Structure formats: C-alpha cells, structure tokens
Amino acid sequence: MHGPWLYAGSPGHYAFFNGDDALFRSETGTPGASRPGLLRALRGRCDAWPPTADNPYWTHRGSWWVPWEAVGESFGPWRRDEDELEQFARCSRFLQKESLRYSAEATRRRAPQASGFLVWMGNEPFPNNANTSVLEYDGMPKPAYYALKKAFAPLHVSARYDRTDYRTGDAFRAEIHLHAEYAEALHPAAGAVVRAAAFDLGGALLAEREFAAFPLPSGSAPLGAVAFAVPELAEPVFLLRLEAAALDGRTLAETTYLYTATNGSRAWEPLRSLPEAGAVTIRPASRSDREVLVSNQSSVAAVELWMEAEDEAGRPVRFADNGLTLLPGECRTVGWSGRSGRLSSLRAEGFNARAEYLGDHA
C-alpha cells in the first residue's frame, strides 16, 4: 500500500492505522517544515511569514506541502500579520514526528502479518520549506528522524491508543507492546522489565504498570495495558513514558508520548501555551567530550526540547537523540558527532523551554 501522506488528526490518524491491514506499507509519509533558521537563511528578498498558499516563497519551495491549514487544524488559528515562524515550524515538525512515529509503530505491531514500512522520504535534494523528508536540505535531521530511529530499533517499546485529546473524566487506555526483532543480538539482555507510567506536566504520577518479558519476544508482543480516568489537570497536557530495562537496570529502550486534555479546543492547541520550564540547563557531560548533560530543574516538564549546535570549526553537529521531553528533575546524557572535539555553541528551544550551553567551565 502507498500513502497516506498527511497526518489525519485525532482520532482519525489512529483509527486508520489501528485498523490497517496492509501487508507491506511501501510508501507512507507526512510533511514537516524545515527548521526556522534554514527557512530564514534561504528566503533571499522573500518573506518567510506567513507560510500560506499565496506566499510565493512557500509555493515555490514545496507547493504540495504548504502547512498553513494542516497546522491550524491541529494547533488552532494563526495570525497572518504576526510573525510566529519559530513556533509554527515547531508545530509542523511535531505533527510530522507524531504522525510517522505512530504509522511505523502500528505497522510493526502487526508483524509478521505486516512485513515492512518504508518512509517517504529520507533526504531532501531541493531546499523545500516543507516536505515529507526526515532530513533537511543540508542533511540535518528533523524531529521525525529521531522518532523513526527509535521505532525501527532492534529493541523498542510502543503504545497503541485511540486518540491524543481527552476531556476531564474520559477513559485513557494504551496497550503496551514490546518489539525485539533481533533478540539473539541483544545478549546479555535475555529479558526486560517494561514500565509504563503516566505523568501530568508537573511530574505527578497518574498511573503506572510494570510488565515482565522473559525471555524477549521474537518479534512484536503485547504485554498488557495501562488505563485510568483523565483527572482534572492543572495544565492540559499529560505524558506516557515507556521504559524497557534489563535485569541489571540498564535502559534498553524508552519512548515518550504526549496527550492533551483539551476540553473542547483543538487536539494539540494546549502545546502553544504551556507554562515555562525556566530552569533547563545544558553542560558538558563529565565522562565524555562528545556528550552533553541536559537537565530540567523546573517544576514542569520541558516539552520537545530541540537542540542545535556548532563545533569549534563552525560546522553543525548531530545529536544521538533530540526533541527531548524531560520531567521535572530529570537529566539526560546525549551524545553528539562533529568534525572537531568541542562545541562552540548550543541552543535549545521547545514548546515551553529555552536553554543555552553553559560551556566547558560552567
């Protein structure tokens, strides 16, 4: 089967892939905008805002995927006379990530009935402003790249759900699946303990379950479900964190899903007005020059924190993971690769957080 090539919203996207019966999904994609810095750098004398079908800059650079309507349907309306390119691009890129991640995971959960999933497309040979590629024109990954990297990993843990938006009191339910396509290559991890935990934006635990998988399944296997009634939340966002750990405590796989308690607004609109996570720091990790320690010491989760950096040679670097959602008090060590051994700068920004690199001597 070919397609679809758009995020179908909530609950439509999830209903489609939960009911999918394709034996091989040979071309499936979702558009996402390039990062704002690249959009502004390539605009010449054109206007980067608004990203609409009557803006020649956007129609010339990818008229099929002008994102104005798709982003508005999920995140609410935008003003044409107020430049919000950074936030708008973040929303577009998030939709691509959520869409492709769920499409790929849903297909993998049906293995071996479903034998494969090909994302359309990988690289970007022309500087389109928005396209189905998961790598930008200059080779930088989009958030969807990292979601697919996890979804295609030899060991992965995923959740099957019906929607992402809820009202207070609605029943939330997610089926938890463990994927181990190459179990023999994961030695000594002969098995795993999977923890599924739901948190509100402040880090309070809403529900929790643990599942044991000994030995690891050969392929994909359902473990059980986590379910609870969505409470009245201080902030209309909650998350589900899945972690698979070996007996020695090593984390083998981790996936984080976001949901909203909209109570009538559009499915992802609450992400545009989250309280700020004002104490996010990034500093060198002590054990390696090629790792950074990202820490959230604020009272709310830092949502979809995206890092961009250059090495000492002025060239952009690539991170082993990106688009991080960190609970209050959570730290994450992330590796990076570049031509020189040190970072000259690093900036990070998410839906509700900003951080600067504190440097080698902070």
Image (cartoon, grey):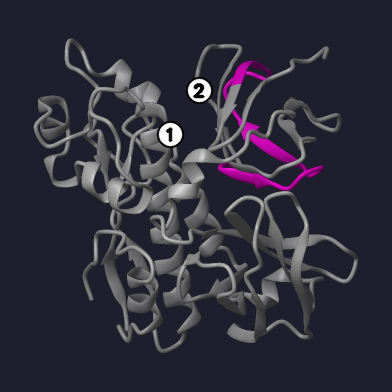
Pinpoint residue 147: horizontal percent, then vertical percent. 51, 54
116 relative position to 295: left or right: left
- Whole-percent x and y of residue 116? 38, 74
Disc 1 and disc 2 in contact, CB within 8 angstroms = yes
Is residue 293 shown in magenta? no
Height in image: 88 above or below 196? above
- For badge 1, the amino acid type reads Met
Q: Is any part of residue 218 visible from this angle?
A: no
Q: What's the residue at 36%, 78% (across, down)?
A: 15
Q: Dot 1: within a 10 Å radius of its alpha carbon, few (fewer than 14), some, or many (20 or more) residues? A: some
Tell how many labels. Answer: 2
Q: Give the vertical position of 82 relative to 142 (above or below).
A: above
66 and 131: which one is in front?
A: 66
Which residues are drawn in magenta? Answer: 322-346
Specify whether residue 333 is painted magenta. Answer: yes
Dot 2 surroundings within 10 Å: few (below 14), some, or many (20 or more)? many
Residue placed under numbered mark 1 in the picture: 140
Left or right for 3, reference 18: left
Q: Is residue 362 visible?
A: yes
Mark seen at residue 256: none
Q: Nearer the viewer, residue 119 or 57?
A: 57
Query: Pointer 2: what residue?
Result: 316
Which amino acid, by three-letter code, is at mark 2? Pro
Residue 170 x, y percent position in the rendering? 55, 75
Q: Earlier in the sequence, mark 1 or mark 2?
A: 1
Which element carries disc 2, helix, strand or loop?
A: loop
